[in-house]
Amino acid sequence: MSQMDAYIASFDGKYYFNLWRPITAIREGDQDGVDATIGDVTWTSVFDTPPTPEFPSTHAYNGAAAAAIFKSFFHSDQVKLDLVSPYYAAGVERHFSSFSQIAYENAVSRIYIGYHFRYAVEVGLRQGTELGYYVYENNLRELKKVL
C-alpha cells in the first residue's frame, strides 16, 4: 500500500511542479538567464533519464515509505543487513545498520546517477517517511475476526 501511495503522491507532485531534470538544466545552462552558469550540451546521466518531471524523487519517496513501514513493524530502526551486488558493481558488499540508512542511500543514488537534484531527494525522503507512518498507523491494523 505504501509503495503504490508513494507512486501516486510523487507523480502528482511531479506534474504539479513540473521541474526540469539535471540533464536539461546542465545542457541548457547557457540559456538559464544567469551569466555565471555555463551549459554543457554533451553532459549525460549514467543511465537514460526518465521522461518525467524531476521533483520530487519517486525513488526516495518509495524507499522512505518502506523504511517507515519496517521501522513501525519492528519497533526499531536498527537492522543488520549485508548485501552483495550482483549487477554493475558485482561482488561489492554493503553493510547496513538501519532502515533509515538503506532509505537514504537508495535516495542519494538518484543524485549520483544524474536523475535528481538534492532537494528533490530530501523532499522525497521526508514525504515518503510521513506517508509510510500514516499507512502503517491507518491501514495496517490487525483485522478483527468476523466469526
Image (cartoon, grey):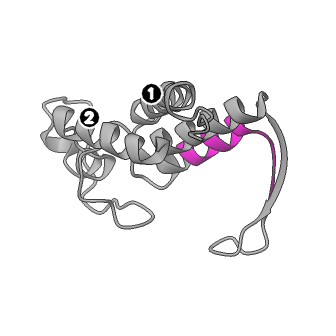
For mark 2, give the secondary structure. helix
Identity of the amino acid at label 1?
Answer: Gln
Of 51 and 113, the residue lying toward us: 51
Query: What is the crowding at mark 1: few (fewer than 14 residues within 10 Å), some, or many (at least 20)?
Result: many
Mark 1 — residue?
127
Query: In the figure, is residue 141 to the left or right of 126?
Result: right
Mark 2 — residue?
13
Give the vertical position of 141 relative to 15 (above or below). Answer: above
Query: In the figure, is residue 44 to the left or right of 75?
Result: left
Q: Residue at the location (39% across, 41% down)? A: 5
Hey, which residue is sitting farthest right in the picture? 80
For mark 1, give the secondary structure. helix
Give the vertical position of 130 relative to 45 (above or below). Answer: above
Q: Residue at the location (33% across, 39% down)? A: 10
Identity of the amino acid at label 2?
Answer: Gly
Residue 131 % position (x, y) = 47, 29
State yes or no: discs 1 and 2 in contact (Cβ < 8 Å).
yes
Query: In the figure, is residue 48 to the left or right of 91?
Result: left
Hey, which residue is sitting farthest front in the picture? 147
Residue interval drawn in magenta: 93-108
Residue 71, quarter of picture: top right
Residue 123 % position (x, y) = 43, 28
Give the vertical position of 25 relative to 36 (above or below). Answer: below
- The secondary structure making up most of the magenta span is helix
Residue 146 % position (x, y) = 56, 39
Sooner in the amino-acid sequence: mark 1 or mark 2: 2
Residue 94 lies in the magenta-colored region: yes
Of 24 and 42, the residue lying toward us: 24
